[in-house]
Image: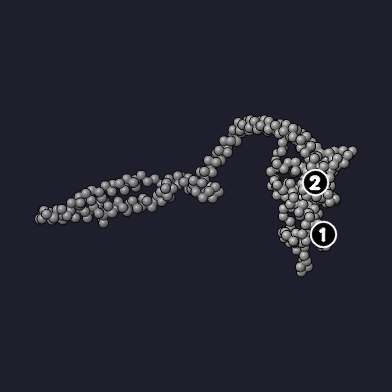
């Protein structure tokens, strides 16, 4: 508003002059007309006093117009056109427009940005205090991590022999009669997401072989069976809902394959287990069986999957057993009957 008044100072003075001229004693002004009007009214009232009520507001209007002239004259006298002030106001307005373009569409947004910058500057100026607070927080949290980590290490150390014993029992069922399985805890230089140490599973599949990390010694089939043994040992505690075993029964005989199938069936009581197998002994133990087939259409290979049951399942198991003769079907039925017992 101040900028608008200063920028239009000359026009305001001009307008005030025109208003006071019309309200004042100048030729064409209102005051001479009002005096003539007053004389006429006075003469009319002398002749007919009853007409006086028509002109009750005349004198007050005359007084108000006179006061208005004085007020406008005073206002005009107080107007000051300061070129330096006008330049300063225009510079401030330009600065404000620049700030709005950079930091927000409104004055409020610019002020909010400035407040945010002030807070950041305050934090920088008090960075020594902030750093000390952060150091205290780090120390406290490190103490908590160490406390929890040591408690976890204690529980792991306590559970490792029991886990090794249970896994070894399951491994024996899966064909590793004399294998050795252990859990090794190796302390880390710094705490990690899983604790203060790295856990390695050590495995020796045959007598006389040194224990080595499972990931370095076991074949894919062996690793799958060891994983099945570990999952079987941890079945009541493992929170993983779905397990997938891809040809876990590869390179094993029929008896071991059946043992693998029974382990997976037991594991299915607490988990959802998906197994990809070519062994009928394993497939017959599943609660549900699916067949994956490949077909070539228009020089493109397409895979499909469908669930089978009833006679379709008998036929598929017979095919997996090596034939479609009645003896193979009878064997397939006996496998399915064995699942139910």
In the orientation shown, which residue stands out farthest toward the right? 208
Rendered location of residue 116, percent (x, y): 55, 41
Report, in whole angstroms, how far the alpha carbon at label 1 lies from the one at label 2.
28 Å
How many C-alpha atoms fall within 10 Å of the one at disc 2: few (<14), some, or many (≥20)? many
At a point 26% along the width and 47% down the height, the residue shown is 67
Relative to residue 331, is residue 6 depicted above or below?
above
How many C-alpha atoms fall within 10 Å of the one at disc 1: few (<14), some, or many (≥20)? some
In the orientation shown, which residue stands out farthest toward the bottom? 298
Location of mark 1 (residue): 328
Q: Nearer the viewer, residue 16 or 109?
A: 109
Residue 41 position by quadrant: bottom left
Could you tell me which secondary element the residue under label 1 belongs to? helix
Can residue 237 be spotted in the picture? yes
Q: How many marks?
A: 2
At a point 35% along the width and 53% down the height, the residue shown is 15
Rendered location of residue 166, percent (x, y): 77, 39
At a point 72% along the width and 43% down the height, the residue shown is 235
Location of mark 2 (residue): 225
Can residue 200 be spotted in the picture? no
Could you tell me which secondary element the residue under label 2 belongs to? helix
Disc sitting over residue 141 in the figure: none
Q: Is residue 143 left or right of residue 328?
A: left
Q: Is residue 134 left or right of residue 16?
A: right
| Colour mapping | one colour
Q: Nearer the viewer, residue 335 or 319?
A: 335
């Amino acid at each position: 508003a101040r900028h608008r008044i200063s920028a239009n100072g000359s026009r305001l003075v001009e307008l005030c002059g025109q208003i006071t001229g019309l309200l004042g004693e100048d030729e064409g002004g209102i005051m001479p007309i009002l005096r003539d009007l007053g004389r006429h009214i006075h003469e009319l009232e002398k002749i007919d006093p009853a007409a006086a009520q028509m002109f009750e507001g005349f004198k007050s209007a005359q007084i108000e117009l006179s006061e208005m002239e004085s007020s406008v004259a005073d206002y005009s006298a107080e107007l000051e056109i300061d070129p330096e002030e006008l330049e300063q106001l225009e510079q401030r307005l330009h600065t404000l427009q620049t700030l709005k373009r950079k930091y927000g569409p409104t004055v409020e947004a610019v002020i909010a940005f400035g407040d945010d910058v002030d807070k950041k500057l305050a934090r920088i100026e008090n960075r020594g205090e902030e750093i000390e607070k952060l150091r205290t927080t780090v120390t406290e949290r490190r103490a908590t991590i160490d406390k929890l980590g040591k408690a976890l290490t204690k529980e792991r150390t306590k559970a490792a022999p029991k886990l090794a014993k249970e896994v070894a029992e399951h491994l024996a069922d899966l064909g590793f009669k004399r294998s050795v399985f252990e859990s090794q805890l190796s302390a880390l230089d710094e705490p990690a997401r899983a604790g203060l140490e790295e856990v390695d599973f050590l495995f020796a599949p045959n007598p006389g072989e040194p224990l080595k990390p499972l990931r370095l010694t076991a074949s894919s089939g062996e690793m799958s069976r060891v994983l099945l043994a570990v999952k079987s040992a941890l079945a009541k505690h493992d929170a993983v809902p779905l397990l997938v075993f891809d040809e876990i029964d590869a390179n094993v005989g029929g008896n071991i394959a059946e043992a693998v199938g029974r382990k997976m069936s037991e594991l299915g009581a607490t988990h959802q287990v998906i197994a990809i197998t070519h062994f009928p002994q394993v497939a017959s133990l599943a609660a549900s069986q699916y067949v994956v087939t490949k077909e070539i259409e228009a020089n493109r290979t397409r895979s499909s999957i469908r669930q089978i049951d009833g006679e379709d399942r008998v036929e598929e198991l017979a095919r997996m057993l090596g034939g479609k003769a009645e003896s193979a079907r009878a064997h397939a039925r006996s496998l399915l009957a064995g699942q139910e017992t």
